Image: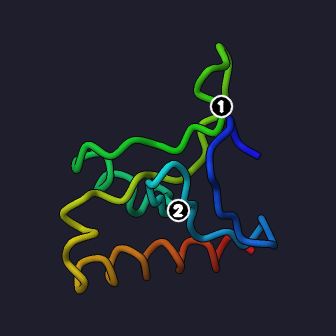
Amino acid sequence: MVSNQKSIYARNFRRLRKIYADDVAYLKVDDSNKQDFVEANSSPFNPYPDKVKTTVMSYYEIPVDVLEDRDQLAVWAERSFAIARKKK
């Protein structure tokens, strides 16, 4: 479990496409879409925020305006899913 958070993980971590923790949804990022998340002031997923030295994973919070727009969410999710598929 990740820092006492309620979390949902895919069973096969290598093919993980999304994370849901503490009522926040995250999508996979790489160099092709990370800037969009940064410009939207999204935060990266940090599984152990209380640790001094921690690993920040390649997942960013889905911006609220994206979550509220079904079409935009579909575009962002498909890009993230494509990243997860190519990382196999």
Give the side of residue 34 with respect to residue 17, left or right.
Answer: left
Residue 27 percent across, percent down from the top left: 48, 63
Placement of 49 over or under 29, stated as above or below: above
- Position of the C terminus, as image quadrant, is bottom right
Q: Quadrant of residue 48?
A: top right
Residue appearing at x 54%, y 60% in the figure: 20
Residue 11's disc is none
**Residue at disc 2, secondary structure:** strand
Residue occupying the point 32% across, 53% down: 37
Residue 10, above or below 2: below
Relative to residue 75, is residue 26 drawn left or right? right
Given the image, on which type of amino acid does mark 1 rest?
Tyr
Q: What SS does tag 1 mark?
A: loop
The Cα–Cα distance between marks 1 and 2, rounded to whole angstroms, is 18 Å
Residue position for label 2: 28
Classify mark 2: residues with Cα within 10 Å, few (<14), some (14-19) or many (20+): many
- Residue 81, percent from left and from top: 53, 78
The answer to which image quadrant residue 83 occupies is bottom right
| Mark positioned earlier in the residue sequence (1 or 2) | 2
> What amino acid is at disc 2?
Lys
**Of all residues shown, which one is farthest toward the top?**
52
Mark 1, residue position: 48
